[in-house]
Image (cartoon, rainbow, N blue to C red):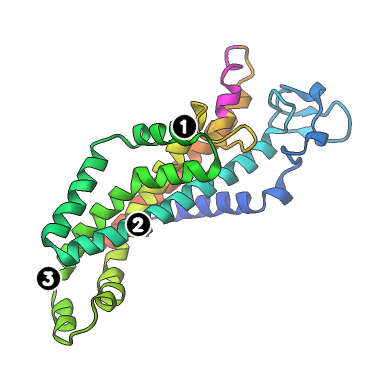
């Protein structure tokens, strides 16, 4: 793996670790109303608390929440949405892609026509429609992202599986009359996973970005579960008044997260490509 790939892996690991240990790393619980003080609202970075020994190193938002604490908890929610939607969409896409490639004929044609129709609509448009019908919520936005992204994995799985299906080891498994499920699970799927993991790393960044966009528009997560996108939206109205930290700091963290995912995905692509590995 390249140096940039290792750097992205380290950065992503640190971000995931910070999200996991947010309750212990955050100076304040942003969900505890008793810990908030209205006199601490919109304080600039480095300001001391109105009452107590606490310092707000990244400032506070309009509710008086410590921005560092809000960003750690927001990062947690963004990663939960991203990883949950990516894993579920990957599993659904693998099932449909393998079935289409293995069965062929009308089954393959039917699955691919469904995938083509799905991919003809922008993912954000489909997610907007689904959330407009179901309303905001953590579980609902995860399902909306799964519905918007599973087709990418189905097409990628089918493409790789069609190549692997014609190789000698699959022909040998057929001659041994192994059950189809065993050939798919133990022979075909493991050889498709390297490509699918690269696609998953790319789509993880897309899922996090899509969730942030939807939350910024106010139709993603509710205000009681602020992700990075919602934190950016909460401070957007204060940018022109000079209170940049409310939006800029969560935005920088979101950019760092997305860049880490994309650089890691590119490194995995190079690692999985024999032509790149030979250079």
Per the rendered image, the range of residues in magenta is 232-240
The residue most toward the top is: 241
Q: Gap in Å between the C-alphas at discs 3 and 1?
A: 42 Å
Earlier sequence position, callout 2 versus callout 1: 2
Left or right of 83 in this view: 75: right
The residue most toward the front is: 133
Can see residue 3? no
Q: Gap in Å between the C-alphas at discs 3 and 2?
A: 23 Å
Earlier sequence position, callout 3 versus callout 1: 3
At which x and y percent is residue 160? 21, 61
Say whether residue 160 is magenta.
no
Can see residue 56? yes
Check the image and report above or below for 74 versus 213.
below
Neighbours of disc 3 within 10 Å: few (<14), some (14-19), many (20+): few
Asked if marks 3 and 2 touch (Cβ < 8 Å), the reply is: no
Q: Which residue is mark 2?
A: 92
Tell me what residue is drawn at x 60 percent, y 54 percent.
17
The quadrant holding residue 205 is top left
Q: Gap in Å between the C-alphas at discs 2 and 1?
A: 23 Å
Check the image and report above or below for 258 versus 157.
above
Tell me what residue is drawn at x 31 percent, y 60 percent.
94
Neighbours of disc 2 within 10 Å: few (<14), some (14-19), many (20+): some
Nearest to viewer (mark 3 / mark 2): 2
At which x and y percent is residue 253? 55, 38
Asked if marks 2 and 1 touch (Cβ < 8 Å), the reply is: no
Disc 2 element: helix
Name the mark on residue 214.
1
Tell me what residue is drawn at x 48 percent, y 26 percent.
217
Q: Which residue is mark 3?
A: 166
The residue most toward the bottom is: 176
């Amino acid at each position: 793996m390249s140096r940039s790939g290792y750097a992205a892996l380290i950065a992503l690991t640190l971000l995931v670790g910070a999200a996991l240990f947010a309750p212990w790393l955050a100076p304040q619980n942003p969900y505890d109303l008793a810990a908030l003080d209205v006199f601490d609202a919109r304080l600039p970075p480095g300001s001391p608390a109105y009452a107590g020994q606490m310092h707000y190193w990244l400032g506070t938002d309009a509710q008086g929440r410590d921005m560092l604490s809000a960003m750690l908890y927001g990062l947690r929610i963004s990663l939960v949405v991203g990883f949950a939607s990516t894993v579920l969409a990957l599993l659904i896409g693998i099932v449909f892609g393998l079935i289409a490639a293995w069965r062929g004929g009308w089954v393959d044609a039917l699955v691919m026509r469904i995938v083509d129709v799905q991919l003809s609509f922008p993912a954000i448009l489909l997610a907007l429609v689904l959330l407009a019908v179901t309303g905001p919520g953590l579980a609902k936005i995860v399902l909306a992202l799964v519905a918007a992204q599973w087709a990418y994995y189905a097409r990628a799985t089918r493409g790789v599986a069609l190549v692997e299906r014609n190789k000698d080891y699959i022909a040998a498994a057929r001659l041994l009359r192994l059950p189809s499920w065993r050939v798919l699970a133990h022979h075909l799927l493991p050889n498709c996973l390297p490509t699918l993991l690269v696609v998953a790393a790319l789509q993880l960044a897309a899922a996090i970005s899509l969730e942030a966009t939807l939350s910024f528009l106010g139709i993603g997560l509710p205000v009681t579960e602020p992700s990075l996108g919602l934190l950016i939206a909460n401070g957007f109205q204060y940018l022109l008044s000079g209170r940049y930290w409310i939006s800029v700091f969560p935005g920088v963290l979101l950019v760092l997260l997305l860049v880490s995912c994309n650089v890691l995905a590119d490194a995995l692509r190079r690692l999985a490509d024999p032509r790149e590995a030979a250079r």
